[in-house]
Image (cartoon, helix red, strand yellow):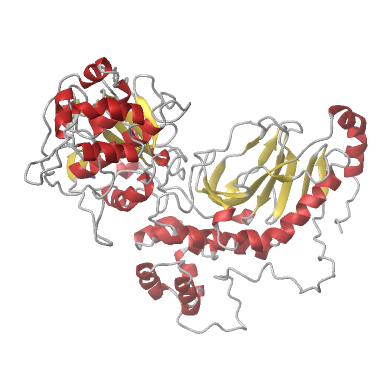
């Protein structure tokens, strides 16, 4: 059995490396007999994983396991009553003598205990080009991870889809999503957070700030090879983008033969010690030999894929413009060590470094108090902003406010809600456009989202993520943004009621609702990005798709929604929304440059039966072509 870990990120180019440092040597364990066969002969084959993870390598090793340890495993559900009774004759009935070493452990905690905010020493060493090795876990931490995984998997024996599965990407190994293992993510988060921050130092200036995140909610996951197994074919880890791959060895090298990672570019097979990691760019052709893999995939879909020939020559790699009619704000901020502030500054109205002169020190201080800039970024920004108090007679187009735009007049207990004017316009058939937000409301939403995302920097899974449905954009569920749902609820409530008037007689009353609790969500394109392929938004049901433009069209080029049925690309103004049925084939048009933010919502509903739909279809469409009064 062998273990290591992979972590994928998108990089933008190639730059300097860090100085090599020797990795620490890690002691190895002793070789073992065929434990699986021995356990099978005793009717204990299902216990192989939990016993191996506890340090047992042959049946005779059970004599080093005390009855108290076995009892603790039974109490934790790691062995059931039947296996407990079968194992009892093999274990020691003596109490553990602290003067005698017991190399077996059944503990699933303690190895990750640490003083608060202890910096992690990765002990990086350069192998060649963009290939590094370093230390991620201690031996004790690796063993605890293995026990946590195997103990959880044993509890899932007999439950379909629980425990180890072959469902993820190869039939030659078994896989287990780490989120299923109780306590895994919270136990290891502090190390992964520091690893992510450290990766920026390995590729300085080449990874878009705040862009590292999990690829989907199934990451990270474990991969386990037990016995002879075929390795992977030569491959790269990329789809359209260049990732960073991190392989971390969780097993003692004495526990397996074979294994390792062969990298074509350097014509070497890299073998790791327990707890050590190998890092290389995902577009390097490599082959994984049989091992127990820990796979983590994170992506940032902010830049176009780099051809391999240009990736290896950083002088020929060009940057991607991120603002229209302005300097490249991202590059300017990167040069000042302020790259992580791009989102919050852009949402506040900054389009180039010179615009910071229109930001007052009071506004910057308000951002600091909201947590929208950290102390170090605040100090770096301070020399660029205006120290003069804001003159009310001079317009300041920058704003740091995250409230006010949705304020409405107070109403009495029995007064009717002020109706929202959606200003519906029929494009064709069941396709409509209307006004959902004002420009000020869009800008406030953008600031609320970016300020929240900045506060999540360094926390795995927080802020913008590529986890929802496309690698070409970043996503953020609106429910994660403090105050968003309560602030916008009155508008979305009226929108849902108004949709019945767009499809009269065709939607069952009171049936419109969010398709799931992740709706609505925000989508952000930063720089050139591939659009989505032609698709529909349905699974079994016909949804209503709402697409709201949050950006000023002057902030980007490209974009729009192409709908096959009418052979048109629809472009929206800021605050405007496009509504169409989810079963209409459509595609998102490529973004050429700039920053484009949209709000997407999928609404589920119960449609009346097909006969009723057919009878009223033409009538419904005719009615929809008439001006629609707001719902009172």
Count every numbered label the image shows and give the total: 0
Question: Between residues 243 and 498, which one lies in front from this camera angle?
Answer: 498
618 left or right of 578 in image: right
Question: Between residues 179 and 313, which one lies in front from this camera angle?
Answer: 179
Q: Residue at x 84, y 66 (%)?
A: 416
Q: Is residue 284 visible to us here?
A: yes
Residue 447 appears in which quarter of the rendering?
Answer: bottom right
Figure check: 333 above or below 393? above
Q: Residue at x 64, y 31 (%)?
A: 535
30 left or right of 449 in image: left
Q: In the picture, which quadrant includes the N terminus?
A: top left
Figure check: 15 above or below 328? above
Residue 284 appears in which quarter of the rendering?
Answer: top left
Q: In the picture, which quadrant includes the C terminus?
A: bottom right
Residue 70 appears in which quarter of the rendering?
Answer: top left
Figure check: 190 above or below 611? below
x, y (%) of residue 114? 24, 57
x, y (%) of residue 303? 45, 43
x, y (%) of residue 297? 39, 38
Q: Is residue 2 visible to us here?
A: no
Q: Residue at x 78, y 37 (%)?
A: 606
x, y (%) of residue 107? 25, 43
């Amino acid at each position: 059995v062998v273990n290591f870990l992979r972590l994928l990120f998108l990089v933008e180019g190639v730059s300097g490396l860090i100085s090599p440092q020797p990795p620490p040597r890690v002691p190895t364990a002793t070789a073992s007999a065929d434990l699986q066969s021995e356990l099978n002969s005793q009717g204990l084959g299902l216990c192989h994983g939990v016993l191996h993870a506890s340090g047992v390598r042959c049946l005779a090793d059970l004599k080093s396991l005390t009855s108290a340890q076995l009892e603790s495993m039974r109490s934790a559900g790691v062995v059931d009553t039947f296996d407990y009774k079968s194992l009892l004759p093999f274990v020691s009935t003596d109490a553990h003598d602290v003067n005698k070493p017991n190399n077996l452990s059944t503990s699933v905690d303690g190895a990750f205990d640490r003083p608060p905010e202890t910096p992690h020493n990765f002990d990086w060493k350069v192998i060649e080009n963009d290939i590094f090795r370093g230390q991620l876990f201690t031996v004790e931490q690796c063993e605890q991870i293995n026990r946590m995984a195997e103990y959880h998997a044993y509890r899932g024996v007999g439950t379909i889809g629980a425990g180890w599965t072959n469902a993820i990407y190869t039939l030659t190994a078994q896989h287990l999503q780490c989120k299923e293992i109780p306590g895994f993510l919270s136990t290891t988060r502090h190390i992964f957070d520091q690893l992510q921050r450290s990766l920026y130092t390995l590729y300085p200036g080449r990874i878009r700030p705040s862009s590292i995140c999990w690829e989907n909610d199934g990451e990270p996951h474990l991969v386990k090879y037990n016995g002879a197994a075929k390795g992977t074919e030569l491959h790269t880890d990329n789809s359209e983008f260049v990732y960073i791959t991190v392989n971390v060895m969780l097993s003692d090298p004495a526990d397996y033969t074979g294994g390792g990672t062969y990298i074509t570019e350097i014509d070497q097979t890299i073998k790791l010690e327990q707890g050590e990691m190998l890092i290389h760019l995902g577009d390097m052709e490599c082959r994984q030999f049989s091992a127990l893999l820990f796979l983590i995939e994170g992506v940032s879909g902010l830049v176009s894929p780099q051809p391999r020939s240009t990736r290896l020559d950083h002088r020929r790699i060009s940057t991607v413009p991120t603002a229209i009619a302005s300097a490249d704000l991202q590059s300017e901020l990167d040069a000042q060590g302020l790259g992580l502030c791009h989102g919050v500054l852009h949402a506040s109205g900054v389009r180039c470094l010179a615009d910071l002169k229109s930001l007052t020190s009071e506004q910057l201080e308000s951002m600091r108090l909201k947590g929208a800039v950290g102390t170090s970024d605040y100090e770096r920004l301070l020399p660029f902003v205006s120290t003069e108090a804001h003159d009310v007679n001079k317009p300041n187009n920058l704003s740091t406010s995250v409230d006010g735009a949705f304020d409405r007049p107070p109403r009495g207990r029995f007064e009717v809600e002020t109706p929202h004017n959606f200003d519906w316009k029929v494009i064709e058939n069941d396709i409509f456009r209307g006004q959902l937000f004002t420009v000020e409301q869009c800008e406030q939403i953008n600031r609320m989202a970016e300020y929240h995302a900045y506060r999540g920097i360094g926390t795995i899974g927080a802020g913008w993520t590529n986890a929802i449905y496309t690698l070409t954009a970043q996503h953020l569920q609106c429910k994660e943004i403090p105050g968003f749902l309560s602030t916008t609820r009155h508008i979305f409530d009226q929108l849902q009621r108004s949709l019945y008037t767009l499809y009269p007689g065709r939607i069952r009353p009171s049936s419109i609702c969010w398709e799931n609790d992740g709706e609505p969500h925000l989508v952000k394109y930063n720089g050139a990005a591939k659009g989505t392929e032609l698709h529909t938004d349905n699974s079994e049901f016909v949804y209503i798709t709402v697409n709201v433009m949050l950006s000023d069209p002057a902030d980007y080029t490209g974009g729009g929604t192409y709908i096959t049925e009418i052979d048109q690309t629809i472009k929206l103004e800021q605050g405007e929304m496009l509504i169409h049925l989810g079963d209409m084939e459509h595609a998102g048009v490529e973004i050429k440059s700039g920053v484009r933010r949209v709000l997407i919502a999928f609404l589920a509903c119960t449609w009346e039966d097909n006969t009723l739909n057919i009878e009223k279809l033409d009538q419904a469409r005719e009615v929809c072509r008439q001006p629609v009064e707001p719902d009172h």
